[in-house]
Image: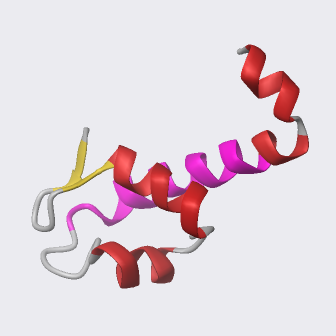
Amino acid sequence: MYVCLCHSVTDAHIRQLVRTEGVSSMRELREHLGVATQCGRCAKCAKDVLREAVSDARCEAACPGLMAAA
């Protein structure tokens, strides 16, 4: 799903960035993808996706076998 139309950012882009670059804040997300730097309508959705992706990444790190089985 598209999160930021101005910069063509999807939820998958955000999730991948969290996994590969360790991004965990809106500031870092803005720096990498430009999210919420133009019209700002995506800020809440981007923050929600980021929060969920960070939570998922922490769960994967804490219980790698459990997440693989799901």
Q: Is residue 21 left or right of residue 31?
A: right
Q: Is residue 30 left or right of residue 19?
A: left
- Report the number of discs: 0
Query: Does residue 15 show up magenta in the picture?
Result: no
Residue lying furthest top in this view?
69
Q: Quadrant of the C terminus?
A: top right
Q: Which residues are magenta?
A: 41-58
Residue for point 48% across, 61% down: 17
Q: Position of residue 29 (x, y in %)?
A: 43, 73
Q: Quadrant of the N terminus?
A: top left
Residue for point 77% across, 50% down: 58
Q: Position of residue 2 (x, y in %)?
A: 21, 46
Q: Is residue 52 left or right of residue 65?
A: left
Residue for point 48% across, 74% down: 26
Note whether 20 is above or below 61 in the view shown: below
Q: Position of residue 13 (x, y in %)?
A: 36, 53
Query: Does residue 49 show up magenta in the picture?
Result: yes
Residue 12: image quadrant is top left
Magenta stretch mostly in which secondary structure? helix
Residue 14: image quadrant is bottom left
Residue for point 82% across, 47% down: 61
Q: Is residue 7 left or right of residue 11?
A: left
**Visual colour scheme:** secondary structure
Note whether 24 is above or below 44 in the view shown: below
